Amino acid sequence: MNRRMLRNAVVTAVAAFAMVPAVAVADSCPHPAYLGTAATSHSHVHGRAVTPNGMALNVRSGPGMGYRVVGTVRNGSVRGLVCKTNGSRVQGTTRWYKLRHHRGYVSAHYVRAFRALPWCRVTNG
């Protein structure tokens, strides 16, 4: 009886671990789209700005340091996030978040999202 229970436990563990790489690969798919973007779903996701020394976080017109600054977000404030996309590298990450109520993007390095975000997608128009 112990051999059967051990075998079932091993099969269950292998099945559980077999699903992990598929999820990680699906989430790491690069999506360079950023201009004229819309969320792939209408979930409510929020994130908290976390900056060094309590400085304000720059909001940019696109997902990169080369885009103009169109506003700021106070350190510690919570903002609605629409989607994620790839952009220029900031402190080791290329992920950027589009803000819900602001036409701009913030580096994911300085934002702690409370849940996973959908990828941004290009809209025709």
Image (spheres, rainbow, N blue to C red):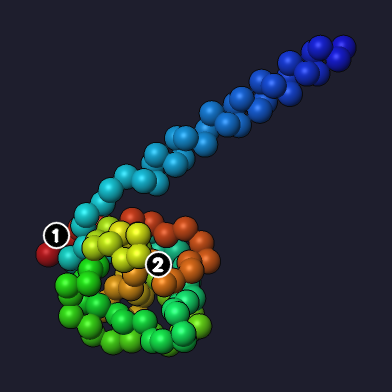
Q: Which of marks 2 and 1 is in front?
A: 2
Image position, residue 109 (x, y; %):
40, 67
Q: Disc 2 on helix, strand or loop?
A: helix
Determine whether, in the image, residue 45 is placed left or right of residue 33.
right
Q: What residue is rendered at 22% in x and 72% in y?
A: 65
Q: Is residue 49 above or below residue 119?
A: below
Q: What residue is rendered at 31% in x and 66% in y?
A: 90
Q: Quadrant of the N terminus?
A: top right
Amino acid under disc 2? His
Determine whether, in the image, residue 73 is placed left or right of residue 68.
right
Q: Which of marks 2 and 1 is nearer the N terminus?
A: 2
The answer to whether residue 37 shows anywhere in this view is no
> Which one is in front, 42 or 80?
80
Q: According to the image, label 2 marks what residue?
A: 109
Determine whether, in the image, residue 106 is placed left or right of residue 69.
right
Q: According to the image, label 1 marks what residue?
A: 124
Q: Is residue 5 above or below residue 109?
A: above
Image position, residue 71 (x, y; %):
28, 87
Q: Name the quadrant containing residue 22.
A: top left
Amino acid under disc 1? Asn
> Which one is in front, 115 or 52?
52
C-alpha gap between disc 2 and disc 1: 29 Å
Q: What residue is rendered at 28% in x and 48% in y?
A: 30
Q: In which quarter of the image is the C terminus?
A: bottom left
The answer to whether residue 41 shows anywhere in this view is yes
